[in-house]
C-alpha cells in the first residue's frame, strides 16, 4: 500500500510505486497529476476501463489515522 494522502490511495486498483511514482491498473506507467485533482466521488473512468473503487481495508486504515 502507498500512503500519500490522495483519494487514489484508497482505491482497490492502486498497485505499486515505479521509482517514486504511484501506479495503478488504469495507469501502469504512473498516475497523472490531473487524476489527483478530481473529486473522490467522480464517476469518470480513469483509463483502460478502470475507475475509482474504494478498498474497504484501505479506507478503514486511513480512518484509523484520521485521514
Image: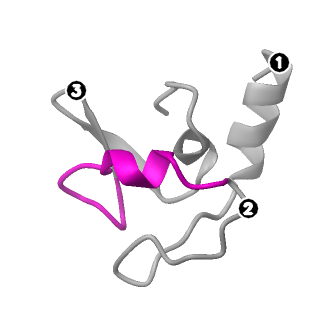
Q: Which residue lies at the image location 44% right of the left edge and 54% below the top edge?
A: 35
13 on left or right of 43 = left
Quadrant assignment for the C terminus:
top right
The answer to if 36 sits in the magenta stretch is yes
The circle drawn on residue 20 is: 3
Q: Earlier in the sequence, mark 2 or mark 3?
A: 3
Where is residue 25? Give x, y as percent: 36, 64
For disc 1, the marked residue is 66
Q: Earlier in the sequence, mark 1 or mark 3?
A: 3
Q: Which residue lies at the image location 56% right of the left edge and 55% below the top edge?
A: 38
Q: Which residue lies at the image location 74% right of the left edge and 27% below the top edge?
A: 62
Are dots 2 and 3 in contact, CB under 8 Å?
Answer: no
Q: Quadrant of residue 57?
A: top right
- Residues drawn in magenta: 24-39
Mark 2–mark 3 Cα distance, whole angstroms, equals 26 Å
The circle drawn on residue 41 is: 2
Q: Which residue lies at the image location 54% right of the left edge and 71% below the top edge?
A: 51
Q: Secondary structure at mark 3?
A: loop
Within 10 angstroms of label 1, few (less than 14), some, or many (20 or more) residues?
A: few
Are dots 1 and 2 in contact, CB under 8 Å?
Answer: no
Mark 1–mark 2 Cα distance, whole angstroms, equals 19 Å
Q: Secondary structure at mark 1?
A: loop
Tell me the chief SS of the magenta region.
loop
Within 10 angstroms of label 3, few (less than 14), some, or many (20 or more) residues?
A: few
Amino acid at each position: 500500500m502507498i500512503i500519500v494522502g490522495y483519494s487514489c490511495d484508497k482505491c482497490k486498483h492502486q498497485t505499486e510505486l515505479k521509482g517514486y511514482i504511484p501506479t495503478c491498473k488504469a495507469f501502469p506507467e504512473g498516475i497523472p497529476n490531473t487524476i489527483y485533482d478530481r473529486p473522490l466521488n467522480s464517476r469518470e473512468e480513469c483509463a483502460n476501463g478502470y475507475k475509482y473503487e474504494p478498498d474497504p481495508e484501505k479506507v478503514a486504515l486511513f480512518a484509523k489515522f484520521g485521514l
